[in-house]
């Protein structure tokens, strides 16, 4: 190679490198305008899409209805004289306040604190199940784990986590990983994947306006065999095959991912299903804000959520100053977008705020993220470290206690997906005979019953934490040996279940009460609802066991099932044993580990939670728990008829 060619080659290489570096340089003005576009775009999409939520499930509307407009929400905009909060924007507002309070990377424990304080109603599905588990004592990511959160596959995380990405402009790896971390507060497995893809797309959109490229680059942040990633590539294929027929592409998608979706995950709120609607809307929208917005609504299902998320992404691409005036100023007399008012109608102790103030605060947070993760600011120019990585904060994550029983193999992990790679040590106490501890995992076969206090240490290269735990090893479960299962409702009436506003796939439920002693605590066929007839009158439900011979029982272990928004819980419970006189007697006072909730409001209750009840031993041939069913009112017209029932997966009985 000649010297001249070598010099030219080096020049081209240097030019490409400089071009790559310059692509991560942005002015203060442009950055702020794009962040404003993200926030205002989300407000537009959320408020615009709300009237069409779940309206287009089986049939999509004709394009002749485009543009839809704000329809009935124009009255709410006039009522509040500005934008109003909803779950597509208000939780991100909470996240902004948490970053301002704790720094750019709050811990899961701090996120839990923010959720429990500010969120007291108006969340659903995975968000609501996560909140119940938080009140039970869990921290993320156990609150989103598919074992304990039966809504792990629903849409929730993709509509509340965009802020992690538009405070990390150009930091695609960082934004994708941080979005994944936050999504696991409520969800698991492929349920978090749309959130990761959107996070990557949001971060890259500050420097790229090509929708197709944003989607394809975002896919690189997901495993190639990820369920959602596979489906997104199918959506691209449908668009290429039917470039002028979005209704055809949507019909094919809905057939596979809704009508033919496996029963366990078939809902109109499925994360992948709604995520695909967003992808199709973007592809067929061709970068046009108004058309993309209308397509998000027309694609149907939980359409206000994808409308908010996609409109926020389009807002970054276009910038706030280029958003359609009729969408930002829908009420006559407004001089600023949404009259510069964000009115809180959904969250506890979350102040109303001028929209410009919120944008300024998000912009300031973005500058902090940029500078603390390797970027810098020189005058009007902001230089971004596109190679920044997100490392989850070091912390113990709190989940269920180990479920240990003599003679039963143990396979339990104190670690979770975010702290499994840190160093784990047992620094105080000793394992029960037969159990071992290594790298955060508990394994073996326990050979002695009792309570065993231990202290664990979790360490990174520059920090360590310790936490106390207590292991409970139970004696052999007597439930499988019982001659009879005591219950007033022995069979689930599926017709009554069908009349519920049920949010779960039917495969979750068992028809026969005998499942409460089959050892299956989670998943397919694990849950028994004591639904026999439509009734909103409080009733008492009974579950227990009888044996031919007496047993000296001092402990029951209750595993609750999944909860509807209106039922499945109790106001109080009592434990009774069968005396020699043939009558039932109270066991007297008992200790609950953990303590029973102080409130019976179903909104705050945990799903798939385990309670251990200890009491003075009673020698008996039968024992039972009596539940006073909680009747919870709800907005849906059907639920008032089917509120009185208990949701249970297992009931164990143990002797001293």
Image (cartoon, rainbow, N blue to C red):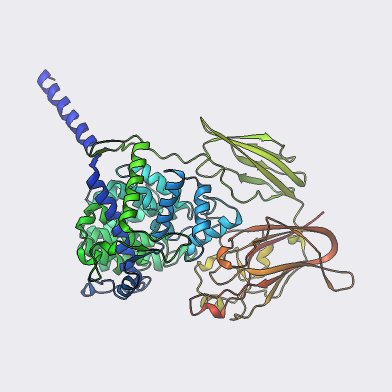
Q: Image quadrant for the C terminus? A: bottom right
Residue 403, image x and y in percent?
Answer: 67, 51
Residue 84, image x and y in percent?
Answer: 36, 66
Q: Is residue 537 above or below residue 294?
A: below
Outermost residue, top direction? 3
Q: Is residue 149 above or below residue 541?
A: above
- Residue 203 appears anywhere in the view: yes
Outermost residue, right direction? 581
Residue 502, image x and y in percent?
Answer: 51, 71
Question: Which residue is nearer to you in this view: 214 or 378?
Answer: 378
Q: Give me the residue at 79% from left, 62% from top.
A: 589
In the image: residue 178, left or right of residue 575:
left
In the image: residue 181, left or right of residue 311:
right
Q: Is residue 265 above or below residue 35?
A: below
Q: Image quadrant for the N terminus? A: top left
Q: Give me the residue at 26% from left, 51% from top.
A: 34
- Residue 548 appears anywhere in the view: no
Dividing the picture into quadrants, the one containing residue 346 is bottom left
């Amino acid at each position: 190679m000649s010297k001249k060619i070598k010099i030219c080659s080096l020049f081209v290489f240097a030019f490409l490198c400089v071009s790559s570096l310059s692509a991560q340089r942005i002015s203060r003005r442009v950055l702020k305008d794009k962040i404003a576009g993200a926030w205002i775009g989300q407000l537009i999409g959320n408020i615009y899409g709300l009237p069409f939520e779940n309206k287009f499930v089986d049939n999509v509307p004709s394009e002749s209805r485009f543009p839809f407009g704000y329809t009935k929400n124009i009255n709410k905009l006039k009522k509040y004289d500005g934008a109003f909060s909803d779950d597509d924007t208000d939780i991100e507002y909470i996240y902004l306040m948490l970053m301002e309070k704790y720094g750019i990377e709050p811990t899961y424990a701090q996120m839990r604190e923010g959720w429990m304080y500010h969120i007291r109603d108006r969340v659903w599905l995975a968000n609501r199940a996560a909140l119940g588990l938080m009140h039970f004592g869990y921290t993320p990511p156990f609150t989103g784990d598919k074992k304990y959160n039966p809504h792990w596959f629903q849409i929730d995380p993709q509509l509340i986590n965009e802020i992690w990405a538009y405070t990390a402009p150009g930091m695609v790896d960082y934004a994708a990983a941080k979005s994944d971390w936050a999504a696991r507060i409520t969800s698991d497995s492929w349920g978090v994947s749309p959130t990761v893809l959107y996070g990557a797309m949001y971060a890259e959109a500050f420097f790229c306006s090509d929708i197709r490229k944003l989607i394809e680059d975002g896919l690189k942040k997901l495993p190639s065999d990820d369920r959602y990633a596979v489906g997104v590539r199918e959506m691209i294929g449908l668009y290429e095959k039917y470039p002028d027929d979005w209704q055809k592409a949507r019909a094919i998608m809905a057939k596979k991912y809704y009508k033919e979706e496996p029963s366990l995950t078939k809902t109109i709120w499925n994360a992948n299903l709604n995520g695909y609607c967003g992808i199709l809307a973007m592809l067929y929208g061709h970068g046009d804000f108004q058309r993309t917005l209308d397509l998000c609504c027309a694609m149907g299902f939980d359409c206000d959520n994808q409308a908010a998320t996609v409109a926020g992404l389009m807002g970054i691409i276009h910038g706030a100053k280029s958003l359609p005036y009729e969408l930002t100023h829908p009420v006559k007399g407004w001089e600023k977008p949404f009259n510069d008012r964000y009115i809180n109608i959904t969250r506890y102790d979350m102040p109303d705020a001028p929209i410009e103030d919120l944008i300024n605060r998000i912009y300031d947070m973005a500058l902090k993220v940029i500078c603390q993760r390797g970027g810098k600011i020189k005058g009007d120019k902001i230089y971004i470290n596109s190679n920044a990585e997100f490392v989850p904060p070091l912390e113990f994550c709190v989940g269920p206690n180990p479920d240990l029983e003599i003679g039963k193999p143990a396979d339990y992990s104190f670690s979770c997906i975010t702290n499994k790679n840190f160093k784990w040590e047992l620094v105080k106490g000793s394992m029960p005979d037969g159990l071992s501890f290594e790298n955060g995992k508990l394994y073996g076969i326990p050979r002695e019953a009792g309570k065993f206090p231990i202290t664990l240490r979790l360490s990174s290269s520059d920090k360590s934490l310790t936490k106390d735990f207590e292991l409970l090893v139970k004696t052999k479960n007597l439930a499988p040996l019982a001659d009879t299962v005591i219950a007033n409702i022995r069979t689930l009436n599926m017709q009554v279940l069908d009349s519920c506003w049920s949010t779960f796939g039917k495969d979750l439920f068992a028809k026969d009460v005998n499942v409460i002693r089959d050892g299956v605590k989670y998943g397919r066929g694990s849950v028994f609802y004591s639904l026999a007839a439509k009734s909103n009158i409080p009733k008492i439900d009974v579950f227990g066991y009888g044996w031919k011979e007496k047993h000296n029982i001092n402990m029951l272990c209750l595993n609750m099932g999944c909860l509807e928004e209106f039922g499945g819980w109790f106001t109080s419970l009592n434990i009774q044993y069968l005396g020699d006189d043939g009558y039932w007697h109270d066991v007297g006072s008992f200790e609950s580990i953990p303590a029973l909730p102080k409130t019976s409001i179903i909104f705050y209750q945990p799903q798939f939670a385990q309670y251990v009840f200890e009491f003075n031993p009673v020698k008996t041939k039968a024992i039972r728990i009596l539940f006073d069913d909680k009747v919870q009112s709800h907005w849906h017209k059907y639920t008032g008829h089917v509120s009185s029932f208990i949701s249970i997966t297992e009931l164990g009985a143990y002797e001293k």
